[in-house]
Image: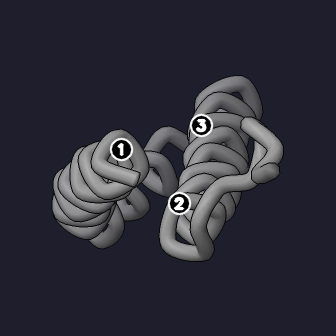
Amino acid sequence: MRQMNEYNQFFRFTIKLFKYFSLTVLGFAIACYLSVILGIPAIATIMMSVFGEWLLRLTAVLICLGAIAIFAESIR
């Protein structure tokens, strides 16, 4: 009999991507916060202009992957 906590590989991969994405966003937020505290807000502005669009796109892709993984897991 199959255990209930066994997830498929795609679901585990998506969860791992969410984990690393969350850590990346947290590091990005800390870097922006520290640049403002240290009195160099130009660094935060540059980081937002460079990475802002990529973070939004990556967020959309991860949400879609999560939805597909949840759908595939619910079918199983």
How far from the left and from the top, in percent, is residue 23? Answer: 71, 49
Residue drawn at (46%, 47%) of the image: 44
Q: Earlier in the sequence, mark 3 or mark 2?
A: 2
Residue type at mark 3?
A: Ala
Residue behind mark 1: 70
Residue drawn at (42%, 61%) of the image: 47
**Total number of numbered labels?**
3
Query: What colour scheme governs how the chains and residues are painted in the rendered image of this protein?
Result: one colour
Residue behind mark 2: 11
Mark 2 Cα shell of 10 Å, populated few (<14), some (14-19), many (≥20): some
Gap in angstroms between the C-alphas marked 2 and 1: 7 Å
Vertical placement of residue 45 versus 12, above or below: above
Residue drawn at (64%, 62%) of the image: 12
Would you say residue 30 is visible in this rendering? Answer: yes
Gap in angstroms between the C-alphas marked 3 and 1: 28 Å
Tag 2 near tag 1, CB within 8 Å: yes
Would you say residue 52 is visible in this rendering? Answer: no
- Nearest the viewer among 21 and 52 is 21
Residue type at mark 1?
A: Ile
